[in-house]
Image (spheres, rainbow, N blue to C red):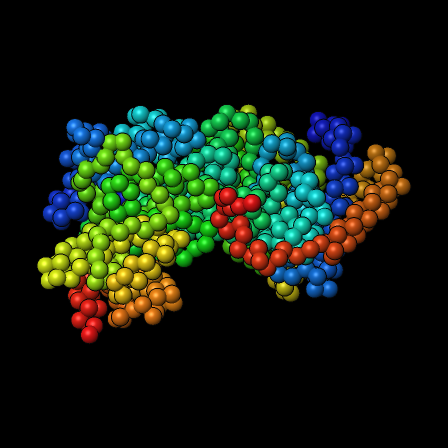
Amino acid sequence: MTALAQDREALLEAGAPALLRQMMRIRRFEEKCAELYSATKIRGFLHLCIGEEAVAVGVISSLLPGDAVISTYREHGHALARGVPMESIMAEMFGRATGCSRGRGGSMHLFDASRRFYGGNAIVAGGMPPALGMALADQMNDRDDVTVCIFGEGAVAEGEFHESANLAALWGLPVLFVCENNLYAMGTALAREHAETDLTARAASYGMVAWAVDGMDVLAVQEATHRALAQVRGGGGPCFLELRTYRFRAHSMYDPDRYRDKAEVERWRASDPIPALTATLLERAVASQAEVDAWQAEIEAEVAAAVEAAEAAPLEPVSDLTRFVTSERGRG
Amino acid sequence: MTTTSRRAGGPRDPRRAAKAATISDAAETAAAAVEPTAQPVEHAGGSMVTTYREALREAHREALRRDPRVFLMGEDVGRYGGSFAVSLGLLEEFGEQRIRDTPLSESAFTGAGIGAALRGMRPIVEIMTVNFSLLALDQILNNAATLQHMSGGQLTVPLVIRMTTGGGRQLAAQHSHSLEGWYAHIPGLRVLAPATIEDARGMLWPALQDPDPVLIFEHGSLYPLKGTLADPPPEVDIEHAAVRRPGRDVTVIAYGGGVSKALAAADLLAAEGIEAEVIDLRVLRPLDEAALLASVGLTHRAVVVDEGWRSGSLAAEVVARLAEHAFYELDAPLERVCAAEVPLPYAAHLEQAALPQAADIADAARRTVSGDG
């Protein structure tokens, strides 16, 4: 047995069942969201991460409570993995007052300051500069918290990526850059938008450690994240992880998905992280089918309760429309 | 390419110094050369002779001393001493942690200011000119101004962003525009335009106390402005407009670099027996509508001065408010004196022709009083 396989073994024993359960939870939540979108309960843009759950779970399960997460508009999985309550996320999707952004944000802008979850940024690469600043504040105050900045491979074409990568490396900031490479920037394939498709080489050109990981393998993602965090937290400067993954669904509910070959989608579905890990756990008797079934039932109940609560939740009064534009000094 | 060209053509580039120094109130190079030390001259009687630039520097020094969370970052704020010499000497006094030179990455360092503010710091971000701030507009609009609302009130961004604005220094069409009206369009921002030495000295501290993002626009022609400042300097608010000269016949509303022109116009008018009241807006967002309405309620006439282009300008907003709320008070059509609708040209005579001048303001004021029976 190789050293790597032994590590995996250890990881499996330690936390793999919890990782699987979390991925199942995210998957089921998002499937329900798609249904509710079709039923017009959820509106606006809805970007699902179905197929990419191993990234959300592998990365975020590795963080400490003091770490920060800045994400993108495809962030339901990140928010759930970070511990933002499903009920408050679903209520946000419904535009309710009990939503995690009080109905101001919707699917693309989930926030939970108490868990240091800072959205939900729908400008591609727009979350990167603030991530630097949070990390800078931590560095200036000798805190060992890490800021994790999640973005897609499309962001690597944005100027803000390059400005941010340079500044983070220049100042040695405690930032972990997590690039979810799902091969498509909306409908544009990687090779159709990048002259150099080796994203780690581009990140490394700024003087930071960068490597690519199988983003369909939650254990590999977690292992890589732990390694990267050790460096960043230890004052070693920023790190860049490229997580190679794939979204099984279209870009958003509006996307007719004309730009991908169906056979390609099917090939990737064969490496779906959830059945793969389920099979591994059952095979090694780390979990039983009965346990997996019990998790699924618990998740169904949690999702159903979240939907029920969102349906029943109050709307923000229109008289509060202009609240939260500027701070409410002296407000009762 | 952008960065090298603007650096080479920067306002303190010695190659431009001779030319710049020939233009009155234009010469950052000359001004910095004659006032290399940061210390204002103290006079007996509790006041000192100082400049707008030194007043800004003292405001930074005070903020950095009073609050350990405050730090300054931007292009050339440290070793160079600030592209307009505002921060000259601060690196030596406060060190590299708190006076941070940044790469030419407006979006990254402005956004970093937002993140640091979210994390409890009180950053001051300096952007070289308002034209360059467009490279950071994503961060200013989509994050700084928006995060509080989008997060349902969970986040606030106590960030101060300072930048130079305005023309009159022969810096042509990528260093001279007045785009503060665009920023004043954005809910979630407070927008300030210090026009006096007192405001240059006094606005920074209350801006840093504001829990929300504040933009401070410093008109480039004002840095060498000399004057006296009380010692200790007076506290100022960042809420209200100010009457800079009282008058009964016509209200002239200006801000930033336009205030001195409005006061010069008022002198011209006074010689003809027309008493103009000059209002300095000071705060471009939120507008102090009450002050404007109070003055127009007395004079029944108004001229609005704005170095921005007329179409969709801040001046357009001011006259719209007056038309909405003071229509029956008005004895003459509202007048605007704005920049000509051209990218600002380099040649001095063309640039001056494009900008509002005291004579233009006086003409507009005369029109408001001449039609009155």
Left or right, residue A135 beside residue B207: right
Left or right, residue A111 beside residue A273: left
Residue at screen point 31% across, 28% down: B91
Expressed as whole percent of the image width and height from the top left, the position of residue B59 reads 31, 35
Expressed as whole percent of the image width and height from the top left, the position of residue B226 reads 17, 40
- Quadrant into which the C terminus of chain B falls: bottom left
Q: In the picture shown, does residue B97 fall above or below A77? A: above
* Residue A78 or residue B183, whichever sits in front: B183
Residue at screen point 26% across, 70% down: B331
Residue B106, quarter of picture = top left
* Residue A61 or residue A273, whichever sits in front: A61
Left or right, residue B35 beside residue A314: left
Expressed as whole percent of the image width and height from the top left, the position of residue B60 reads 32, 34
* Residue A238 or residue B82, whichever sits in front: B82
* Residue B331 or residue A15, whichever sits in front: B331
Expressed as whole percent of the image width and height from the top left, the position of residue A152 reads 57, 48
Q: In the picture shown, does residue A119 fall above or below B66? A: below
Is residue B261 something that shows in the picture?
no
